[in-house]
Amino acid sequence: MWSSFFTPDLFASAIRMATPLALAAIGGTICERSGVVNIALEGIMLVGAFFGVVVTLAAQASTVAGIAGNAVWFGVVAAVLAGIALSGIHAFASVTLRMDQVVSGTAINILALGLTGFLMEVIYGHPGATDSVAHKLGPVFSFPSGSTGILGTIWTWVDQIVFSYTPIVYVAIIVAVFAQWAMYRTRWGLRLRALGEHPRAADTVGVRVLASRYSAVLISGALGGLAGANLTLEQVGSFSENMTSGRGFIALAANIFGRWTPVGSYLASLLFGFAEAIEIRMQSFQNVIQIPVQFFLMLPYVLVVIVLAGFMGRAVGPAAVGKPYEKE
Amino acid sequence: MSETRELPVVTEALWARVLRTAGVPLLSVALAMAIGSIIIVATGHDPILAFGALFRGAFGGPMQIGWTIMRATPLMFTGLAVAFGFRANLFNIGAEGQLVLGSFAAAWFGLLLGGLPSIASIPLILVGSALFGAAWALIPALLKAKVGAHEVITTMMFSWIALYLTSWLVSGPLMDKGGIPQTSMLPASVWLVTLDKIIPGLPPVSAHIGFLLALALAALVWWILKSTTLGYQIRAVGFNPTAAENGGISIARTTVWALCISGALAGLAGASEVLGVQHRMFDQVSAGSGFGFTGIAVALLAKKNPIAVIFAALLFGALSAGAGTMQLEADVPQKIITIIQALIIFFVGAETIITWLIKRRQKLALEKKGAADVV
């Protein structure tokens, strides 16, 4: 039984499931490092997922071959733009208006729920779920399966765990590494970190606090939108209401567990992604294990609480996070 | 210098205070409705027809007013729950989860205690629901108090855990015969009766005595916050935790009490729905009640004031009660209500615009005054 449980696909599944969490978590990291809490990631992801599908469905119905053939890419761009637009509201509310950032984030989450549900009925005439897109984003590589024997087995593992993914999965890994480099090795990163620790000091040495915070929030919006695109255009293929089901909040926990660093966020997301992969795998073993499916489904959420409980005491976030900045 | 500073503050404060207590919330609702209208127009519908239908659906007659009160009742409980947390600087975003546990407790105890007279069973069930709601908030509260884990993440996670846990309970151990994931119908002895049963002369309405309970609780919460030691501690911690701690108040203890009481209030929302409206518990995973989230909007619109929660809840209850009629008559999807809710939170929260304007005016007045003094 265990050999059919711990297959290469289980680990590949963990990396796939980690992807939306990681993108949102890295977005959260950049945002919080600049001093702005972004609990709106849940809604940003939801809106990205929705507009990704809406634009893909519209584009694939186009009679222009170039558009219909690349429909899903238009969807990805739309998802990112939708994420940026929604995070723009958060930036305006929390940076310019100095509104309570958690309240603004909550309002955006509720807005995202209402907007996607409302537009779904306006566009498709029914609540619930959209149609599936004709073509999801496919795997980047496709190699022939290897020969039999031990070499064949090794190749199957490598192929599954390294080469089996769709584009956004690889993008997430690149984003994690690149953001880590940018945060600790560039002037942009130094300034970003200074903003979240001591904005007054950053201001006095000439960092434009408000503009920099805006850009950090918008970057997190783009990443959140991309996370949504991964959910609908790579994983599921269609949109259903409230389909993010708490992933934005799990991503925030991953950001904390990853100690507010991009690579740390990715690795923490991998842990939660693995829990999700196990959950999915267990469901297919349900007749063997005899545990109600709901207990698997709650696994990722329970893991988040356990991780926060065991780890939180030692995690210290940016000093000025959540505090609006007022120029003197 | 100090006298010149006093003057403009006093003259400004009158209209500013009027604006702040009632003006900002009312203005926020009006602005949110206006933007809602723009969305309705943009999607090719008639906003006047839509809001007309919504108004008739919420207030068109005794039956409609009954719906509004029925919908407002759980929102009063969740609104009080979230507002209570806010007072201690806690954001109970997971009130939904505590509500679900309260619903479950009501259904479970309701099935067990059906044989008792109502006067004994109903209070017991309500206490049970409140305890289950409080228990569901206890772990996030302890984590917040002991290790500083943010309650926004933990209560949200507990919400999802609650949904799956009760989903299993109503589709497994407590499932009704017939294979639908729901409990059996509760015995009528534990139902919260509708208001027409106790108020002679009232036509049949769906509003139930849970509404009166919610009114009483609003007053109780107001009294706890205003006149008890715990209320004082909660307000002190919410206002300035460092000062409170220096004054000898335990932040950890106050946090745990505040979040658990908040959870108890949310749990009662679940009991009120199960005993007063549904008379059984359904699987909530796919739909969820949404009362927890709307409770946040209610608490913010009420500006964390327990008495104002009553009116804010009635407003959202009216929107929710009228939404069906609006969809039926004007073909506008009910979800527009959710959008309006979010907009109201924005406008109430963005009160800083108004205070910023007031400060600016004061500053200008001061500068003018200062310049005049020098001349």
Image (cartoon, coloured by chain):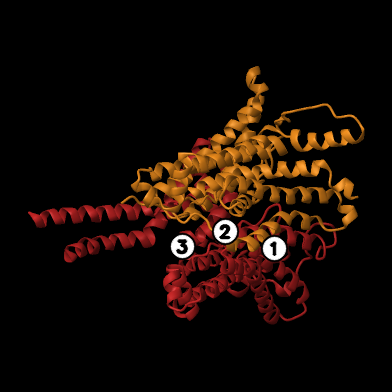
Chain colours: A orange, B red
Q: Which residue occupies the extreme right position in the image?
A: A149
Residue in view at x 86 percent, y 29 percent: A146
Q: Position of residue B374 (x, y in %)?
A: 9, 55
Q: Are marks 1 and 2 on the same chain?
A: no
The answer to whether B194 appears left or right of B28 in the picture is right
- Where's the N terminus of chain B, which quadrant? bottom left
Q: Nearer the viewer, mark 2 or mark 3?
A: 2
Dividing the picture into quadrants, the one containing residue B373 is: bottom left
Q: Return the x and y of residue A33 as percentages of the image width and height.
A: 50, 49
Labels in figure, total: 3
Q: Amino acid at mark 3?
A: Ala
Q: Amino acid at mark 1?
A: Gln
Residue A231: image quadrant is: top right
Question: Could you tell me the amino acid type at mark 2?
Answer: Ala
Q: Is residue A184 left or right of residue B347?
A: right
Badge 2 crowding class, 10 Å Cα cut-off, few under 14, some 14 to 19, many 20 or more, is some
Query: Against A229, is B325 above or below?
Result: below
User: Does residue B178 appear in the picture of this structure?
Assistant: yes
Query: Residue shown at 78%/55% (left/top)?
Result: A296
Circle number at residue A122: none
Alpha carbons under labels 2 and 3: distance apart = 35 Å
Where is residue B269? Give x, y as percent.
Answer: 62, 66
Q: Which residue is mark 1?
A: B278
Nearer to the camera, B231 or B154: B154
Tell me: residue B168, above or below residue B326.
below
Badge 3 local density, few (<14 within 10 Å), some, or many (20+)? Answer: many
What is the CA distance from the residue labelled 3 to the residue labelled 1?
27 Å
Residue annotated with mark 3: B302
Residue A315 tag number? 2
